[in-house]
Amino acid sequence: MANTFVIVDKLKDWKSFFPAEKLLTSHEYLSLWDDPKMEGQDKSKIKVINLCRSYKYLSTGYYTSLLAEARGHTVIPSVKTINDLSRSFLYLLQSEDIDHTLQKVFKTKELSKEHTFNIYFGKADHPEYSELAKYIFEKLSIPILSVTVEFDKVWKILSVKSPAFNSLSPTDEDNFASSLDEYSSKIWRKPKSKKKYRYDLAILYNPDDKMPPSDKKALQNFIKAGKECDVLVELIEKKDFSRIAEFDALFIRETTSISNHTFKFAKKAEAEGVVCLDDSMSILRCTNKIYMHNVMERNNIPSPKTFVVSSLQKDLLKEIPEKLGFPFIIKIPDGSFSKGVFKVKTQEDYEKYQEEIFKKTALILIQEYFYTDFDWRIGVLNGKALFACKYYMTKGHWQIYNHEHKNKRGYDVGRFESLPISKVPKYVISTALKMAHQVGDSLYGVDIKEKDGKAYVIEINDNPNIDSDVEDLILGDDLYIKIIQDFVNRIEAN
C-alpha cells in the first residue's frame, strides 16, 4: 500500500486525535520536502489527505493539492475537485439517481424545510443518509462536506460546502476520526499481526447479477490465487466507488457498458493510477459492434458479411434481403450475452425488427447468417492465448443463449467443451490474437465461427466469462494464478 500523509495547517488542529507519525503541516509539506519524516519514502507512491482549513484559490490548502499533483502524489481533494467546489457545481449532482435517493431518504423524516448533515470521506454522520453521502462523495471527493437540503414540493440539495477542519465539534470529530480511520487504512494504528500483502486487488462484482462473468466459486478462486501471488483480493460493489484509490489494481467482473458504472470505475481507476482490467478504452471499443466491424474491415480480419445502416438509408435497407438472402441477422451495436441479436426469416420480420431497433439506436448492423454447431471462445490475456472453449448452440435454437426459454434462470444456455490451446486449429488461434491485438493488451474473449477451414470473427468481448468448471477446466487453479500474476506484472511496470 502507498504511504499516506495527513496535512494540516497547524499541528494544534490535530490535538483531539491520536498522534500520527505521518502528520505534516502545510508549511512542512510545501517548503520542507526533505523533512526527516520523508526519509526512505518512495515519493511516487505517496497519498496525501489535505485537511487544510481552506481550499480557496491561492490558499495553503489549494497549493497543497496543486503541488501534490505536481509531485505525482495521489491527493484528496484534487485541484479539479477544489475548482468544482469553488464555482457553481450543483450541476454535478443533478441526476435521476440522486433525486430518487433524496426523496427516499427524507420522505418520512419530520424535518424542517431546511436540513444540514455532514459527510466525512463518503460516510454520513447519520447512517440513514449513507447512500446519498456516497453519491455526493463520488462527485465531490473532499474529506469533509456539509450538505444542506431543502423542501419545496420535493427535496432538493440547496448547498454543499467544505467546513474548516478546525471548526468540528467533539461529536463531529468522533465521526470524522472513524471515517478517516477506515478511509486511510488505519494510518495511525499499530499494524495488526496478520500477514501483509505486497498489493491489494479489488474485484468489482454484482452479487445480484443473473448472468455474471464469473460465478461465486470462480471469485473465490481468484481470492485464493491472490494469496498464492502475495496479493490481497477483496470483492467490492458499485457502492464502493469512492474506495478505488485504496487499491493497487481493479478487476471488473461485472458486465461492462459505457452507460453504466463499470465504465466510470475504469475511468476513475485510471485517473488514480490504479491498474485496471478491463481498461476504459477496451470497454469503449469492445462494447460497440460498429466500431469493431470497422476494425475488422480495416485490418482484413475475416468476419461474416456485414452492413452498417442508418434509418435514412432507405435504398440500402431495401436491397439487403437480396444481397444477403433470408435468413440474416440484425444486431444492436451494444448487446451482450446474445441480447439484441435477432434472426430475420421473412420480409415481415425484417420490417418489424427495423422499426423496433431504430427506436433505440441510430445505426444497426445487418449480417449474413451461417449456422455452426458451436462458436469458439478464445481467451486472450496480454496478447497471449489463455484458454479455449467451444460454446454450443442451445438445443433447437440458433444461439448459445436462448432468452425466450422460461426456466428458473430466465434463459437457457448450450453445453460447452474446454480444450487445451494445443488442440485448437492454429488459424483459429492466430485470428483471435490478431483481433485482440487491434483492441489492446487487456483480457478478451474472441468469438469465432469455423467454416470450410477458415476462422470468422463474430465479436470480441472485453469482459469474458471465467467460470468455475468451464473456462478453468484445463488449467485449473493455474488460470486464476496467471491472471493475478498479470496484475502483479502490470502493477510493477506501472
Image (cartoon, helix red, strand yellow):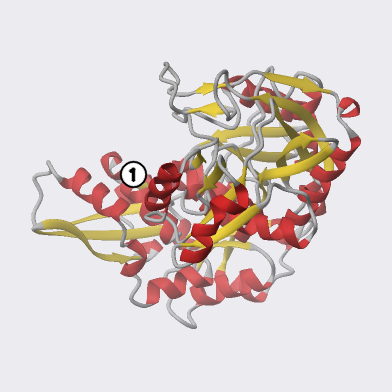
Residue 320 in picture, x, y percent from top left: 56, 54
- The secondary structure type at the circle numbered 1 is helix
Residue 43 in picture, x, y percent from top left: 74, 61
In-image side of 124 versus 157 (left or right): right
Q: Is residue 263 visible?
A: yes
**Mark 1, residue position:** 131
Residue 366 in picture, x, y percent from top left: 56, 51
Residue closest to the eye, 40 or 366: 366
Q: Is residue 4 visible?
A: no
Figure quadrant of the N terminus: top right
Q: Which residue lies furthest to the bottom in this view?
A: 58
Figure quadrant of the C terminus: bottom right
In the rendered view, tell whether residue 57 sits above or below residue 295: below
Q: Residue furthest front?
A: 322
Instruction: Give the residue drawn at x 45%, y 71%.
Output: 82
In the rendered view, tell whether residue 462 sits above or below residue 26: above
Amino acid at the residue labelled 1: Glu
In-image side of 14 versus 246 (left or right): left
Residue closest to the eye, 28 or 458: 458
Residue closest to the eye, 483 or 243: 483
In-image side of 110 versus 380 (left or right): left
The image quarter containing residue 109 is: top left
Residue 14 in picture, x, y percent from top left: 47, 57
- For disc 1, the neighbor class at 10 Å (few under 14, some 14 to 19, many from 20) is some
Instruction: Give the residue drawn at x 75%, y 54%.
Output: 440
In-image side of 25 versus 248 (left or right): left
